[in-house]
Image (cartoon, rainbow, N blue to C red):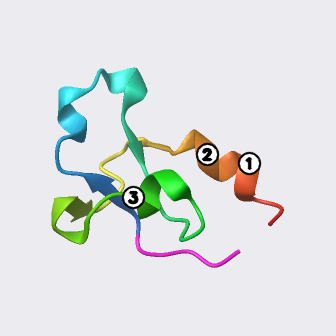
Amino acid sequence: MPTVHPFYPINEDKKTREERVFHNNPKCKVGHGIQIWERKQSTNNYRLCPVYAGLVGE
């Protein structure tokens, strides 16, 4: 599965801890919809976007 450098939206810290996620899959529509200038490169110890789990076999 191709990946991109892990990133999260700059406003992710406004969510509850349980809702915070990072993205690293170029096929994930949630992550793809986040503008480049609204991204921070890191996982920030957030959990992986749950949409990724559905894309693992693709």
Using the rendered view, name the quadrant where residue 46 is placed: top left
Q: Position of residue 26 (x, y in %)?
A: 53, 71
Which residue, given by chain and number where applicable, does mark 1 sit on? 54
**In the shown orientation, is residue 6 left or right of residue 39?**
right
**In the shown orientation, is residue 43 left or right of residue 30?**
left
Say which label, 2 or 3, has the lower sequence index: 3
Mark identifier at residue 33:
3
Mark identifier at residue 51:
2
Q: Does the CB distance between marks 2 and 1 fall below 8 Å? A: yes
As for residue 34 lying within the magenta part, the answer is no
Q: Residues within 10 Å of mark 2 (few under 14, many from 20)?
A: some
Q: Residues within 10 Å of mark 3 (few under 14, many from 20)?
A: few
Secondary element at tag 2? helix
Q: Which residues are magenta?
A: 1-5
Q: Residues within 10 Å of mark 1 (few under 14, many from 20)?
A: few
Which residue is located at x 17 percent, y 41 percent? 11
